[in-house]
Image (cartoon, grey):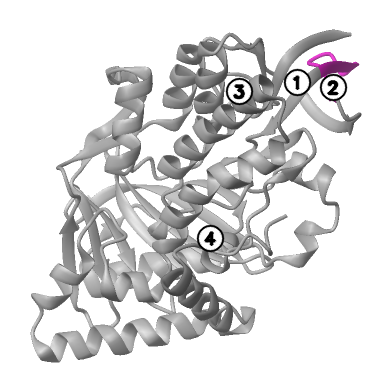
Amino acid sequence: MRSVDVIIIGASLSGAAAAKRLVDAGLETLIIERASLPRHKICSGILSPRGHRFLLENFGPLPREVLHDPTSCRGVTFHFPSMVSFPMDFFGGTTPHLYRKFSDYWAVKRSGAEVHDRTTFTGLEDNGDHVIVHTRDREGGSVSYRAKYLIGADGPTSPVVRALYPNYPKQIPWFFVGQKLHEIIECPLDEEYFHFWFHPGLGHYTWSHARDGKQIVGVGFKVGESFDRKQANVVRYLEEKHGVILNPQPEPDGTAENFGPSLINRYVFGKGNAIITGQAAGFLNMIGEGMSCALHSGAIAGEAIIDSNVRNRSLQELYRKMIASEVRRTSDQWNPFKVALGRPHEADFPEAFLKLSMKDRARVLKDTWNFLLLYKEFKWGRQIIAAGAERMLKGGYSMKEWK
């Protein structure tokens, strides 16, 4: 049985960030990835300024092959049913438009970790001083590894989380997030921006932006509804309201997502010698950008293991104390008190809002309220208010509800 210091499940950005910290500290680190690398990854690719800084500081300048065209994004434009729209530029200028298939692979290689792709995680055993990780290799055979620590960096439907908490997926609402790439006939939407619609009639999460000569039209909704029907409705709306005319034969793409943990402070960080990071843990920024918090939380996971290994301290105790800073930064973006009274985002929503006429401000507030009612069935409102109030009063979010 192969023995290493740390095994990371998932060749993701969070996995790469964790691996970089661990390898630099001299820990033998193995990344296990079920797909063949470089692997496909559904994502807008619009990186935040904070995420861009992290990549530059930890992995170096981005090569051209890890970027889509357009290669950068200037900011975000919000659209409302009342037809009020306003753009918001990112603080600090444009950011990269990552081609996740190649950017993740580039970061994983730059981390210096050993990688076993086409290897599927099937289970784990935590034996106190070490973890046994069970996998199925590319030939279909069973292979087990021994490691002192395990990091789950395997995305929102994380098999590691399911192994640790079998009932967890049943306790949270799931959404399907899909996108289709359309050839453009006519598109007045500014290609320098990521476009987002606060429209309850379109779905829980609706967006569009340019990519490699095509236009992405994406929609998120509860699992169980028809993706094709939902997405076609958005395409019709864009044509009727925004003059966007697209080829009706697109290329589909999609994945399951969980938006809840960041909104209501219900993160999952693991148990024993197994810790969870990135979107598997529940990190997701406002407007669905998860790359920056994946990178930072991954780095924190790596640092917690290094600290635990050197100081012989409880990994869970260290990790939960260290990850609290990233929880504050991420959950602040959904906190209504922080949004109203501070600047938790990397584009200035309050400034853009105040530039509107009084009439348009009233329209935006009404439209936003109607959009939020779409989430009423999940009963998140009171939880968001309670978590937000605690943050304002105590300076942080409670750890009591974390797994």
Looking at the rendered structure, the kind of residue marked 2 is Arg
Q: Nearer the viewer, mark 3 or mark 4?
A: 3
Near-viewer residue (78 or 315): 315
The residue pinned by badge 1 equals: 119
Residue 290 in percent (x, y) is at 46, 47
The residue pinned by badge 3 equals: 306
Q: Is residue 213 left or right of residue 225?
A: left
Q: Earlier in the sequence, mark 1 or mark 3?
A: 1
The residue pinned by badge 4 equals: 262
Q: Is residue 204 left or right of residue 62?
A: right
Q: Earlier in the sequence, mark 3 or mark 4?
A: 4
Looking at the rendered structure, the kind of residue marked 3 is Ile
The residue pinned by badge 2 equals: 136
Q: Over which residues does the magenta segment extend?
A: 133-146
Q: CA distance from mark 1 to mark 3?
A: 25 Å
Tags 2 and 1 touching, CB below 8 Å:
yes
Above or below: residue 33 compared with residue 90: above
Q: Residues within 10 Å of mark 1 (few under 14, many from 20)?
A: many
What residue is shown at x 58% (from left), y 34% (from top)?
301
Looking at the rendered structure, the kind of residue marked 1 is Thr
Residue 403 in percent (x, y) is at 73, 55
Q: Nearer the viewer, mark 1 or mark 4?
A: 4
Q: Earlier in the sequence, mark 2 or mark 1?
A: 1
Residue 175 in percent (x, y) is at 61, 62
Q: Earlier in the sequence, mark 2 or mark 4?
A: 2
Badge number at residue 327: none
Near-viewer residue (310 or 252): 310
The secondary structure type at the circle numbered 2 is strand
Q: Nearer the viewer, mark 3 or mark 2?
A: 3
The secondary structure type at the circle numbered 3 is helix
